[in-house]
């Protein structure tokens, strides 16, 4: 049996994804990190960015995560996000409109959130 890690991705309002994975890539305040089975224990702060999960069945799950924490020990990875959206839940047209609105209003935080949503959708395809 191949090595795997158990992943729990939880947002403030719901459980977003749970299952076995071979790799998780996330953006932290220290930069992008890849976590595989056997990784050293880790505790970090999540930045807004896409989180990519490679499940043991060969599939890829991409989410847009906006802030939170990442914790890893004993092949258990927890991602506790303030907000997390699965790529297939994101309305691309709405995110594009939000990005344009944020640019016109010079709202850097809103622009970043919209950009992360669009990158999560692009990463899933």
Image (cartoon, rainbow, N blue to C red):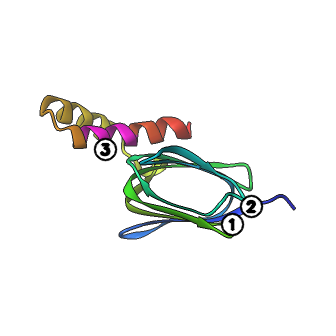
Secondary structure that dominates the magenta span:
helix
The residue drawn where x is 59% and y is 64% is: 72
Task: Name the residue beneath numbered marker 2.
Answer: 4
Taking the image as drawn, is residue 53 in sight? no
Contact check, label 2 and label 1, Cβ < 8 Å: yes
Mark 2 closeness class: few <14, some 14–19, many ≥20 residues within 10 Å: some
- For the residues labelled 3 and 2, the Cα–Cα distance comes to 31 Å
* Chain part drawn in magenta: 110-117
The residue drawn where x is 24% and y is 35% is: 97
100 on left or right of 70 = left
Q: Residue furthest right?
A: 1
Identify the mark nearer the N-term, 3 or 2.
2
- For the residues labelled 2 and 1, the Cα–Cα distance comes to 7 Å
- Which mark, by number, is residue 75? 1
Mark count: 3
The residue drawn where x is 42% and y is 54% is: 46
- Which mark, by number, is residue 123? none
Q: Would you place residue 34 above or below residue 56 in this image?
A: above
Mark 1 closeness class: few <14, some 14–19, many ≥20 residues within 10 Å: many
Contact check, label 3 and label 2, Cβ < 8 Å: no
Q: Is residue 122 magenta?
A: no
Q: Give the secondary structure at mark 2.
A: loop
The residue drawn where x is 73% and y is 56% is: 56
Q: Position of residue 23 (x, y in %)?
A: 66, 51
Q: Give the secondary structure at mark 1.
A: loop
Identify the mark nearer the N-term, 3 or 1.
1
Task: Name the residue beneath numbered marker 3.
Answer: 113
Q: Position of residue 47 (x, y in %)?
A: 39, 49
């Amino acid at each position: 049996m191949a090595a795997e890690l158990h992943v729990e991705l939880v947002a403030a309002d719901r459980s977003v994804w749970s299952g076995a994975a071979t790799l998780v890539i996330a953006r932290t305040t220290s930069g992008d990190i890849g976590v595989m089975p056997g990784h050293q224990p880790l505790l970090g702060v999540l930045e807004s960015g896409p989180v990519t999960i490679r499940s043991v069945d060969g599939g890829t799950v991409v989410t847009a995560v906006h802030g939170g924490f990442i914790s890893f020990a004993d092949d258990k990875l927890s991602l506790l996000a303030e907000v997390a959206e699965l790529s297939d839940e994101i309305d691309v047209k709405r995110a594009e409109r939000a990005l344009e609105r944020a640019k016109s209003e010079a709202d850097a935080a809103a622009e970043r959130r919209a950009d992360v949503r669009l990158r999560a959708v692009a990463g899933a395809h």
